[in-house]
Image (cartoon, rainbow, N blue to C red):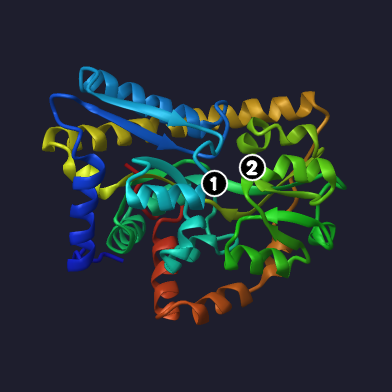
Amino acid sequence: MALRLRWRPRLRARIAILGMLAFGACDEAEGWRVRFSHVLSTTSEFHRMAERFRDLMLERTDGRFRVVIFPSGQLGGERVAFEQIQVGAVHMAITGTPVLSGWVPESQVFDLPFLFEDRDHGLRALGGPLGDWWRERLLERTGVRSLGFLDYGFRHVYNRRRPVESPDDLAGLKLRVLQSSTYLAAYGALGVQATPMNYGEVYSALQQGVIEGGEANAVGFTSSRLHEVAKHFSFTAITYNPITLLVNEAFFRSLPPDIRATVERSATDALAWQSGEARRMEAQALEEMRASDVRVTRPNLGPFRDAVGDHVRDELAERLPDGEAILVRLMAEVERTAAGRGESPP
């Protein structure tokens, strides 16, 4: 998966211009005021990781690097925030790779159903050559740098109608899913009426019956108060969801070398801290579900894998340029990082 990054001349020039326009007023003497966007609430693991990064940077730069966090999609949804980060209106953001498939179609390889054995397997894979390969493509094509991956884990089905214990229970459910062709294909194969929708609209859409459910991890389900309107949560683990910490490359390159190194070190430390916090928060989310009379089920995933089959993978191979070769290399890396075979993530 290893690739050597070569900056395209036009992209390099565009980044340099954006750096002068957007960040020329900031210098080492004045310090930096950094706009950081994400779509989840202030009780989410996204926000806690952002706060951890903010505090580390404030401490390690003697207050010169000041991060201002805009949670709950205040600056727009993930797609809008990514467009803003490209032009420098936002400096940093947290975004899922499915959203970025519009810019980097290869991101869809991470959306394949039942790709990883567990969340630790996903972290091992993303912490190695596979994650480096994707990050280089993102940087080369968009001028946005990934500083690493959060530990979000799998997306599970929740709904307001019935417990999901077999693929038949999904048939006919109108669920909000991420706007990814691979997500739509995977859930369509399970008989779901898959409905893309901005995250900020999900709660009211559930209340009004526009949708009957969706898919998220346990922490996202409770931190966004979805357990108030959907009383069934099932650990279906259909898709693993890589979430990445992003920084505008023009801004990053405009920083002095010591501050760039501090950004990278603080990002690594904040992401490592977030992994432990995410596991703790998941246990807390389950307690909150039980207290709110949410029925939690843990179905046998074998029938779900069988129902999806290979056609989602085959369709993706046809859609992507060099798709078959990419997927062969992907699966080799997935196999290498399976339990007991690869190295642990840094």
Whole-Å distance between the Cαs marked 2 and 1? 8 Å
Seen in the image, is 133 located left or right of residue 197?
left
Disc 2 + disc 1, Cβ < 8 Å: yes
Question: In the picture, residue 219 is in which quadrant?
Answer: top right
Seen in the image, is 142 located left or right of residue 315?
left
Mark 2 or mark 1: whose residue is earlier in sequence: 1
- Which residue bears the numbered disc 1? 77
- Residue located 39% across and 63% down the image: 333
Where disc 1 sits, the SS reads loop
Q: Residues within 10 Å of mark 2 (few under 14, many from 20)?
A: some
Q: Amino acid at mark 2?
A: Gly
Q: Residues within 10 Å of mark 1 (few under 14, many from 20)?
A: some
Name above or below for residue 3 compared with residue 216: below
- Which residue bears the numbered disc 2? 200
- Residue located 47% across and 63% down the image: 101
Name above or below for residue 278 compared with residue 111: above
In percent of width and height, residue 4 lies at: 20, 65
Q: Amino acid at mark 1?
A: Gly
Looking at the image, which is closer to me, 15 or 56?
15
Name above or below for residue 68 compared with residue 254: above
Seen in the image, is 274 located left or right of residue 147?
right
- Residue located 42% across and 64% down the image: 103
Question: In the picture, residue 239 is in which quadrant?
Answer: bottom right
